[in-house]
Image (spheres, rainbow, N blue to C red):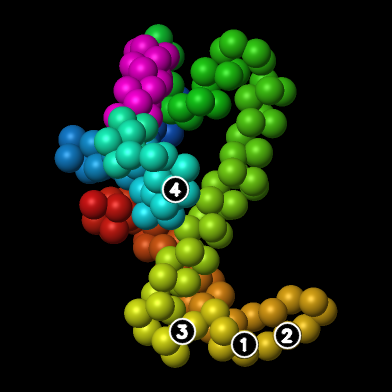
Amino acid sequence: MSVPTVSQPAATAESKSQPTLVRGLSLLDSVLLLVGGIIGSSIFLTAKDIAAPLPHPVLFLLVWVLGGVISLFACFALAELGSMFPDSGGQYVYLREAYGDLVAFLYGWMLFSVANGGSIAALSVASAAYLGEIVPVISQQRVVLTAAGITLTRASIVALLAIGLVTWINVVGLRRGALLQN
C-alpha cells in the first residue's frame, strides 16, 4: 500500500481547512489494490493446507467460492460504510463513529504494529523461502550469523531487503507504489 500524498491548498480567507488527499489512483489501480488485498499472497501460501483435509478436488474449489462470497458480503458492508462516512481513514473512521476515539486509536495502532507488520514479515519470509527453492544460494539453510539466539540466514536477509525495497518504493510516491501493486 502506498502512503497517501497530501497536497496543501493555497491559503485564502475561505480555505483555512485541512490538507486534502490527492486522488492519484485510477479505477484500475483501485480495483487491483482491492483484489490484491482480498486475495493477497495467501493463495500461494495456504492452498495446500486447505486442500489437504478435503477428500475431493471439487470441495477445494467450493471452499474458495464460499470464501469469495463471504468476501463479497464484506465488500458490500464496507462500501455502505464508505458511503455513510466519506472521510479518509477506512475502518478507523467507522470504529471512531461507532465506538469512540479510544477504540479507533487502539485499532489503528494494532493494525500498524501487529497485523500489517506481521503479515508483511510472513509474506517476505515465505517469498524468500520460495526464492531459495529456485535459487539455492539464497537458501534458509545457509546461515550467515547467529547471535543472542537469533539466526540470520541468506533468505532472511533477502526478506529484509525486500521489505526495505517495497517500503522505499511506497515512500517515493503513490504512482510507483500503484505500479508495484499492479
Q: CA distance from mark 4 to mark 3?
A: 28 Å
What is the x, y in percent for residue 2?
39, 49
Q: Are marks 4 and 3 in contact (CB under 8 Å)?
A: no
One can see residue 3 in this view: no
User: What is the distance, in whole Å, between disc 3 and disc 2 at their CAs?
Assistant: 17 Å
* Magenta-drawn segment: 64-83
Q: Residue 163 appears at what percent x and percent y?
A: 48, 65
Dots 2, 1 in contact, CB < 8 A: yes
Whether residues under marks 4 and 2 lie with C-beta atoms below 8 angstroms apart, the answer is no
Residue type (three-letter) at the residue carrying disc 4: Ala
Residue appearing at x 69%, y 79% in the figure = 151
| Res. 146 mark | 2
**Structural distance between the alpha carbons of marks 1 and 4:** 31 Å
Q: Locate residue 113, reporting x and y percent.
A: 64, 47
Q: Mark 1 is on which residue type?
A: Val
Left or right: 46 as drawn, with respect to 9: right
Q: Secondary structure at mark 2?
A: strand
Res. 143 mark: 1
Task: Look at mark 4 in the image and give the residue it sits on.
Answer: 52
Q: Quadrant of residue 29?
A: top left
Foreground residue among 30 and 56: 56
Residue at the image position 54 percent from the left and 58 percent from the top: 122
Answer few, some or many: residues within 10 Å of disc 4's Cα (few below 14, many 20 plus, some between 14 and 19). few
Residue 138: mark in rendering: 3
| Amino acid type, callout 3 | Ile
Say which amino acid is labelled 2: Thr
**Corner quadrant of residue 179:** bottom left
Asked whether residue 66 is drawn in magenta, I would say yes
Tell me the element at label 1.
Answer: strand
Looking at the image, is mark 4 or mark 3 nearer the viewer?
Answer: 4
